[in-house]
Image: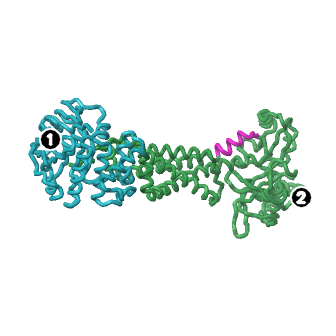
Chain colours: A green, B cyan
Amino acid sequence: MISLAGRDILHGWGKFLFTGLGLGLLIGVTLTMAGVYRGMLDDGRMQLDNSGADLWVVQKDTLGPYAEPSSLPDDSWRRLRTLPGVAQAAGITYLTMQVQNGKRTVRTMVVGIAPYGPGTPGWPRHLVAGRHITRGHYEAVADLGTGFRIGDRVRLRRHEYTVVGLSRRTVSSNGDPMLFIPLSDAQQAQFLKDNDAILEQRRRIAANPVLGRPTVVDAAIESQTSPHSVNAVLLRLAPGARSEEIVQTIGRWQRFTAYDRDAMGDILIGKLIATASRQIGMFLVILAFVSAAIVAFIIYTMTMDKIREIAVLKLIGTRNRTIAGMILQQALALGLIGFVVGRISAGLATPLFPKFVLLIPLDSFIGFFAVMAICTVASLASIRLALRVDPAEAIGG
Amino acid sequence: MNKKGIVIRGLRKRYGEGETAVEALRGVDMQVAPGEVVGLVGPSGSGKSTLLKCLGAVIDPTAGYMELDGEVIFDDGWKVRDLRALRRDRIGFVFQAPYLIPFLDIVDNVALPRMLAGVPNAEARETARELLQALDMTHRIGAMPAQLSGGEQQRVAIARGLVNHPPVILADEPTAPLDTARAMAVMRILQDMARRFHTAVIVVTHDEKIIPTFRRIYHIRDGVTHEEAGEGRPLDAS
């Protein structure tokens, strides 16, 4: 038996192809939205992976620097390093700020890294160009997403930094590219006040009857203006160390809060991205309904155009299942064209997005079967219409 | 080809129930022999279409007897089970408009009922080509329906009706949209094919041009048929 659906499609291939293209663009938007969601998750995971930490020690009873302000003394790493099972400890600061790159303003996450060399928690793991920071001040490693090149000069607050290395996919959970600078520079950038504010504070302290005594004033000014805080201390554990025990020990004796990788993942992905992912999920549902409605409308219209032919087919003895199969095959073919066009258009569009969009094979796989399911459901009304056609309609009178 | 034509006795069809019931057929008698072409003539609302639908196994009569090619297909409420197969294998249809399937070429249009009957595609197409050849359509083989004239389309429709060699062909106003020459050509084809394949052909028509060509005519009025002899005018002289 010949394929009636195939012949019908070939007969009106132009109309069918353009309809498929239109549907494909809609499917492309849907796949891209799924890619945006995956990109957000991946950005969150990247931030965890790139830190190279097993535990995050943060200000007591806070969720840590990715979620809310966290501040702890910058020498905390010394006593944390002495805990059994801790192999490495390093303070770190995070500061999101707008950085000028030529005429362009780039939103970046400035990361202050402890000066213990590559392999220290918080340092970028791999560079794609240049070298790591080797000097204590005024050098920077920038993510490619910042647009900086080796040798570029970056101004942060009062100081300029030279870009000596470039990294890739070192981003915050918001997708902002990172700029790594020495910890002490980052502390100054984050906590040090500007000169006018320091002068104003100096005048206030001097005027204070308690602190204004000559022997106290310098110490008071020093304590209030010098930055000695970090946002977190990153710990890397020794092989075989049990993270739960260390987390409990830190919480009980060190008066900090510690999170292991799973807990920090929950904070980053489960809490920070949850609302955005629900938003995207809702958008995907709406797009799925719109796609279904469009496919249903197209297939229904195509079936309506063939009512007389369907009546003739039934009159000359065509089985109902052959007619239903014809309509279903056309809906699936339309979905297939739409999916292929959608997948290609999503692939072409993703590099144009300002933030990372991740198209993974699993989403394409799920998307394909979702499109086929939607097309199947959308064809049901048309099949019902076709099966209700009376063969007598082919006979006049 | 031991075909036996069609026999109808006391065929009735009622639409609706009770006071609103309409008796469309009130006891139709009809007999058409193999190779014979008869006319079925009557005004609008006389029951022509209802009779055609009953003959075409599209609707069920209310009462009466129908025999097709020697086999009883309806007898006072009893009917054969697979009407779809009956239509496919034993009844050929030719309509007022050709109603060809626009996305199939003319060979596949003709071959389709044969393919639906389970005949392999190649064999069905071969039969279709032979029929198209017999209908002088060789030069159009491979064309799509939209590329044919009205008369050519109607010839393809006749070929489609004949492809399963049915014992009966029901033609519903097959010449209505055609001019006299083409209408006569279609009638000639129907008569030739009826003779060649021993097929009983019932032509429902209003067409004054072709009514004189029938040897036998059934007039239907108010759901009752009256048989009368036709002029049987030769087609070449019409």
Q: Amino acid at mark 1?
A: Ala
Which quadrant holds residue B117? Answer: top left
Q: Determine the chain carrying the residue at label 1.
A: B
Between A312 and B200, which is closer to the camera in this rendering? B200
- Let me know if residue B198 is in the magenta part: no
Question: What residue is shown at x 50% (from left), y 57% (from top)?
Answer: A21
Q: Secondary structure at mark 2?
A: helix
Q: Quadrant of the N terminus of chain A?
A: top left
Between A233 and A48, which is closer to the camera in this rendering? A48
Region of the chain picked out in magenta, as a range: A257-271
Give the residue number, with chain letter if any, for mark 1: B24
Give the residue number, with chain letter if any, for mark 2: A214
Q: Which mark is residue B108?
A: none
Q: Report the residue that reaches farthest toward the right.
A: A215
Q: Give coordinates of residue B200: x percent, y percent.
A: 21, 43
Q: Amino acid at mark 2?
A: Pro
* Disc 2 + disc 1, Cβ < 8 Å: no
Residue A32 to residue A103: above or below: above
